[in-house]
Amino acid sequence: MNSPSAVKDLLSQSVAYSTDSGAAYLGDSRELLGELPANSIDLVVTSPPFELAHQKEYGDDWAEDDQDYQSWFLEFAEEVKRVLCEHGSFVIEIGGAFNKGEPSRSTYQFELLTKLTGDDVGFKLAQDFYWHNPAKLPSPAEWVNRRRIRASDAVTHIWWLAPNINAESATEPDEHPVPEADNRRVLIDYSESQQDLMEKGEYNAGERPSGHNISEEGFFTDSGGAIPDNLIAATNTGSQTHYDKMCKRAGLDKHPARFPKEIPEFFVKFLTPNPPYDDWDRGHLDKPVVLDIFGGSNITGKTAEELGRYWLAFEKDEKYLEASEVRFLSMMQVERKFNDTQHSLDEYTDDCDSDSEA
C-alpha cells in the first residue's frame, strides 16, 4: 500500500506498507526510533515480549543481545522518551510470570517499572491499569490445575507513563493538560442503580464515614456517562475476525500473542484529542501520531486509523508484519495480493471492513 501519508516523512526508511493515515516499518525499533525527530510522537501504545519462565517463539530478544530484560527494554524507553511530545504518553501492557520451577512470582516487571521511573530514564507513572482477560487459560498448569495451590492468573499490568506531569495544567476549561488526557472521551454507561437514582431524584446527601461529603445534587447531574475505572475487561479469543480469516485465507502466520482492540482503543481516546483537528497545534503533524514499537498484528495502528489519528508501527519479524497488513485490506485485496503474487495495492479501490479485535 503506497498511499501518500504525512507520517512517512518522519523516517527515511523504506515503508513495508502504508495507508493515508499511517505506515508500518520492518526493523529493530531502537534503530527506527533513532530516525524519528524529537517531540514528534503524541502517544506510544505497545506490548513488548514478556520475560516468561518458558519463552515463546517470538520473545527472548534480550538473550540474543546478551542482556538482562531491564537493560534491553531501557534502550527502547530512552528513545521513546526522546520522541514523545511534551504532552505525550507511553502505555505499556506487560504480563507477569511465575519463577521457573516453583510457585512464586517473578518481579521482573516491577523491577523494570522502578528503572523506568527512576534516574535511569525519568518517566513518571501517571496511573497503573490492569487488563482482565476472563477467557485466559489457567497457568502454570502445574500449580493451578494439577496441585491446585494457586489461583488462575487472569490479569496483566498496563502502565501509563509520561515524560512530564504538570499539576498546574488544565486548571481552566480552555487549557490543555500535561500529559494530554480527558476521561470524558472514555465515559461508560451508567449502572442501573445510578440510572434509577437519577430518575428518582433523591438520595441521602451529607458526609460519609469515609470523609466524602456528598452534595445535594451531585448524583443527579447527567455527565453523559460514568467515569471508567482502571480495569479493562476484554477477551482476545476471537477466531472469526477479519484478521484471523484473512491470515488463514492467505496462508499467513498470525501473531500468537495479540492484545484486544479495547486496550489501544481506550488509551487512544483517553490520551489524544478527538477529531476534528482544525486548530490542532500541539503535535509535530496536523493531528496526533500514535506509535507501536512492538507492532505485532498492528491492532494499535488499525485502531488509531479508525479513530482518525495518524499511526506508525515498527516490527522486526517480517512474517508478522506481512500478516498485519491484512487488517487494512478487504477480502478481494487479500486475494489479489497474496494469491496473484501482486505486491502493490494502488490499483485496488475496494475498502476493508473494520476489524473488531486484536
Image (spheres, helix red, strand yellow):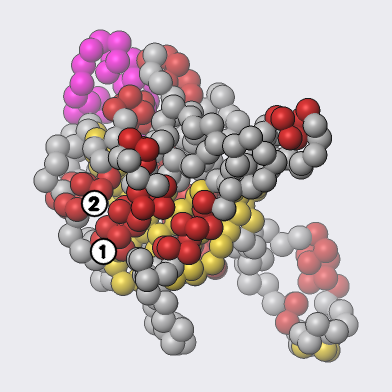
Query: For residue 329: magenta?
Result: yes
Query: For residue 230: magenta?
Result: no
The answer to whether residue 84 is visible is yes
Q: Say what amino acid the circle numbered 1 marks.
A: Arg
The residue where tag 2 is placed is 33
Camera-nearest residue between 187 and 178 = 178
The residue where tag 1 is placed is 82
Q: Say what amino acid the circle numbered 2 marks.
A: Leu
Camera-nearest residue between 264 and 333 = 264
Residue shown at 25%/41% (left/top)? 28
Question: Measured along the vertical axis of the image, is residue 287 above or below residue 212?
Answer: above
Q: Are marks 1 and 2 in contact (CB under 8 Å)?
A: yes
Q: Which residues are magenta?
A: 325-352
Quarter location, residue 100: top right
Q: Is residue 189 left or right of residue 304?
A: right
Camera-nearest residue between 324 and 152 = 152
Question: Measured along the vertical axis of the image, is residue 5 above or below residue 84?
Answer: above
Residue shown at 43%/63% (left/top)? 115
Residue 250 pos. (x, y %): 37, 15
Classify mark 1: residues with Cα within 10 Å, few (<14), some (14-19) or many (20+): some
Q: Secondary structure under badge 1?
A: helix
Classify mark 2: residues with Cα within 10 Å, few (<14), some (14-19) or many (20+): many
